[in-house]
Image (spheres, grey):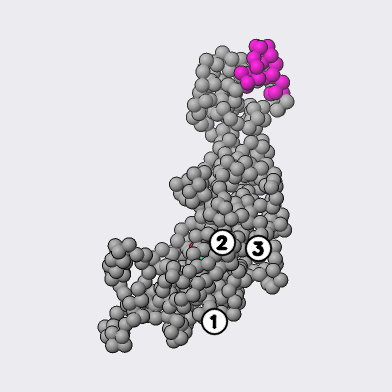
Amino acid sequence: MAETVRVRFAPAPTGYLHVGGARTALYNWLVARHHGGTFVLRVEDTDQSRSTDESVAALQDSLRWLGIDWDEGPEVGGPFGPYRQTERLDIYRDATDRLLAEGKAYRCWCTPEELEERRKAVLARGKPWRYDRRCLERSEEEVRALEDEGRPAAVRFRQPGHDVVVDDTIRGKATFHAADLDDFVIMRSTGFPTYLLAAAVDDWKMEMTHVIRGEDLHSSTPRQVLLLEALGAERVPAYAHLPLIVGKDRQPLSKRHGSVAVEWFRDEGYLPEALVNYLALLGWSYDDHTELFSRDDLVRHFDMKRVARNPAMFDQEKLDWMNGHYIREADPDRIAGLLLERLAGVDADPEVVRQATPLVQERSRTLNEAADMLRFLFEDLEPNEKARKLLDGQGEYLAAVAERLAGLEDWSVDAIHQALEALAEERGLSKTKAFQPIRAAVTFSNISPPLFESLALLGRERSLARIRSAGS
Ligand code: GLU
């Protein structure tokens, strides 16, 4: 890649950022950063019925949260703007007019109902339906009459009738036969271009060197290549179609498999570096075994040549493991800040959260899990079911625990530890038997930060009150 690389992420703003879209954005961004190129964000909002400003904002938020910054695009501008397609309608109109003038496109007055009727008739004869060129074959008088009637017209691209070979970086060469390519619509009667035209024109005008996108768009490529040829583009970009992301059942990843929105992962307490690392490996590998990559490592090593062709399976457990790793590795003060945000409704003492953070960092897969483990420090909770079982029949023992702890001069981790171990020994109890009921009494759960530290952080009075009340 000797020339300056220009790549883009071109989402349709019709909802949240799907993890599949996030992976496409990430791969483009990595290619740009690896090669010192330019990463463009282009908003493909020409489907007026589905695009919203809220979605544009949500997509941008999710990208920013992932640390995927764009060099050109909405808000930052750039020499090839504007970067929202609805602000580029003139450009698509000019391209359409040129194709019309050169006889490479033609107006079509067929209504959806008429098309449907003819399609059904063709299918009933057991033939595949392609647009039948009814409007290309109309006489001049017919056309004039339709124009006089003021009936709105779409514009169709006129297939030149030759095969198209697409040489895809990931999928290799594929020949698309002329017989399978029909005269598709490039401009709707509303004056809005279709995706096929708008994306092709923009890839050309924005001087994209590579088009890296999801596999679902592979079949659009021959149409876009033909459009670029017809428009006299100096070149076509190099195309790379990323493998499908599937769930465990090997079906395309969708809501049926659980949450797929980047914002859900953020809310649930995944760290952006974990999600980035995980998404990078959904289709790409460095070698056969390395799994942990910092953002800098990814920029250094990422190579489209090592993107696989076969579907990539989304494995939530692996992501959870990876997130746990990044939570453990992270600076405790940063994690404490994030936990404090998650404890917003609880009146949490920031200093206590700061002290408790390293204890939960060690044992959480998500920030929400970590925050939940700290709630007992700030409020009384209903014991969970396992905690209730652990407390069953422990009245006498818990009273003894309270008495022993009440006698401590020094409420420190070491003093608490010694006192409780001595009591366990006296009673011939294993550590689990001895400590689990105390954990259940003070944290309302069977899972918590380490017990002695928990008691120390909770403080003498509250600890004793909880142990006494659980034992009575
Ligand atoms: N806007 C298209 C989509 O969201 C992607 C366009 C492209 O990458 O060519 O599916």
Name the residue that disc number 3 marks: 31
- Up the image or down, 281 lies above or below 446; here it is below
Towards the viewer: 23 or 234: 234
Residue at image point 64% right, 14% down: 429
> Which x, y percent locates residue 37?
67, 68
Residue 370 appears anywhere in the view? yes
Towards the viewer: 35 or 50: 35
Disc 3, SS: helix
Name the residue that disc number 1 marks: 232
On whether ligand 1 comes within 8 Å of the CB at mark 3, the answer is no
Type of residue at label 1? Gly
Mark 3–mark 2 distance (CA, rounded to whole Å)? 14 Å
> Local crowd at mark 3 within 10 Å, few (<14), some, or many (≥20)?
many
Disc 2, SS: strand
Type of residue at label 3? Val
* Residue 210 lies in quadrant: bottom right
Residue at image point 66% right, 45% down: 326
Query: Which disc, if any, is residue 79?
Result: none
Camera-side mark, 3 or 2: 2
The answer to whether residue 447 is magenta is no
> Local crowd at mark 1 within 10 Å, few (<14), some, or many (≥20)?
few
Residue at image point 56% right, 13% down: 396
On whether ligand 1 comes within 8 Å of the CB at mark 1, the answer is no
Mark 2–mark 1 distance (CA, rounded to whole Å)? 24 Å
Residue 327 appears anywhere in the view? no
> Which x, y percent locates residue 370?
59, 39
- The disc, 2 or 1, on the residue closer to the chain's N-terminal end is 1
* Residue 118 lies in quadrant: bottom left
